[in-house]
Image (tube, rainbow, N blue to C red):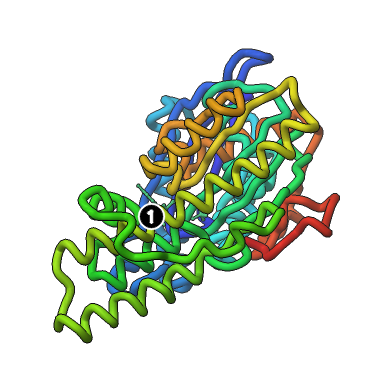
Amino acid sequence: LTFLGLESSCDDTAAAVVRQCGTAPAEILSSVVFGQTELHSAFGGVVPEIAARAHAEKLDTCVRDALVQADLTLDDLDAVAVTAGPGLIGGVLSGVMCAKGIAVAKGLPLIGVNHLVGHALTPRLTDGIDYPYLMLLVSGGHCQYLIARGPEDFTRLGGTIDDAPGEAFDKTARLLGLPQPGGPSVQAAAKLGDPDRFKFPRPLLNRPDCNLSFSGLKTALMRMRDQIVAEQGGLTRKDRADLCAGFQSAVVDTLIKKTERALTLYLAESPRNPTLAVAGGVAANTAIREGLMTLCAQLETDFLAPPLALCTDNAAMIAYAGIERFRAGARDGMALSARPRWPLDKTSPALLGSGK
Ligand code: ATP
Ligand code: FE
């Protein structure tokens, strides 16, 4: 099976071709990503209208490049898979319309993919791991624990009740005048800082569930920053480094503690499949990675982190998730609609916290 995948739910326009023959490992024939960071940088966040326009303008070039790099034409495809949500609706619509156009023109099946399923299945694309496994999705827009049992079968154990960690890193960088995206710049500053000088809160840490909260860190940071500025007239390099180190250590502590809870719950029901996989841009953070690796070693669990280019938004994961859904019998015709919200876990709504 050779699938074209399209992704346009946030601020990356992406197209990819993925092939899987029988039970052989899937192969990424091409994966093209056009980032929009510069378009939004002046606004301090993604502007939905600008994003939608950019997706509409870039999708066709992306598709063409993906086919050229794979050395294929539209005639070589077996189906088109597209992110149908959740995300910024204008962007999702651009992708869905583009996919429908190709599917109609070439008489190909059309498969709608949940963006979160794309992330959640990435370790199967990269490492061919078996179901079930525990997935920690940590990105700029999401933070949740999912037990993956099949392409349409997920249980959500918990997640953030407010901001995603990536969002918290980005806000921290903005408050301290560090460059965007905040993750890498805060991590670099934190390396030189003292994590114990400022005491950041660890919200929900002692609640016996798998939910997290990160919005309080921003408020705490703002208070600390304003106090230093009031006392000294400004921030020194050292102040910035210490603030970043304190902030990062609070994020790491919270994530590790809650991952321990989620993993313990998961291992109790699936002791024979001890695997934790991560996806999302925040998984690039060295301190978070090291913390997770140590935790997994203690709990005799395999730790799996796909290469960064496949952890962040891309279309290879969408094409691959499309292949899995297709094999499971899914077909979405022209009635496929774009969905701004699309929770993964339909089976146990009681476990659903917020939509993030
Ligand atoms: P989503 O995929 O949920 O729609 P997104 O596209 O914003 O959201 P990603 O592209 O997966 O998310 O990741 C980007 C986020 O990862 C940014 O918020 C960025 O600050 C964060 N990030 C990147 N590198 C690091 C790092 N080293 N440490 C912490 N955070 C990081
Ligand atoms: Fe994403």
Quarter of the figure with the C terminus: bottom right
Q: Position of residue 184 (x, y in %)?
A: 30, 51
Front position in the image: 183 or 75 = 183
Which residue is located at x 82 percent, y 58 percent? 349
In the image, what residue occupies the spot 46% across and 73% down? 49
> x%, y% of residue 8?
51, 54
Q: Amino acid at mark 1?
A: Gln
> Looking at mark 1, is its residue's CB closer than 8 Å to ligand 1?
yes
Residue found at the very far bottom of the displayed protein = 230
Q: Residue at x 47, y 40 (%)?
A: 311
Which of the pair 58/350 is nearer the observer?
350
On the question of residue 240 being in view, the answer is yes
Q: How many marks?
A: 1
Residue 102, quarter of picture:
top right
Using the rendered view, name the quadrant where residue 55 is placed.
Answer: bottom left
Residue 261 in percent (x, y) is at: 66, 44
In the picture, which quadrant includes the N terminus? top right
Residue at point 22%, 86% (across, down): 230
Residue indicated by mark 1: 248
Q: Is residue 283 above or below residue 42?
A: above
Q: Nearer the viewer, residue 111 or 309?
A: 309
Q: Please state which of residues 3 and 312 is positioned toward the viewer in this rendering.
A: 312
In the image, residue 234 sits, relative to residue 211, either above or below, namely below
Q: Position of residue 138 (x, y in %)?
A: 52, 49
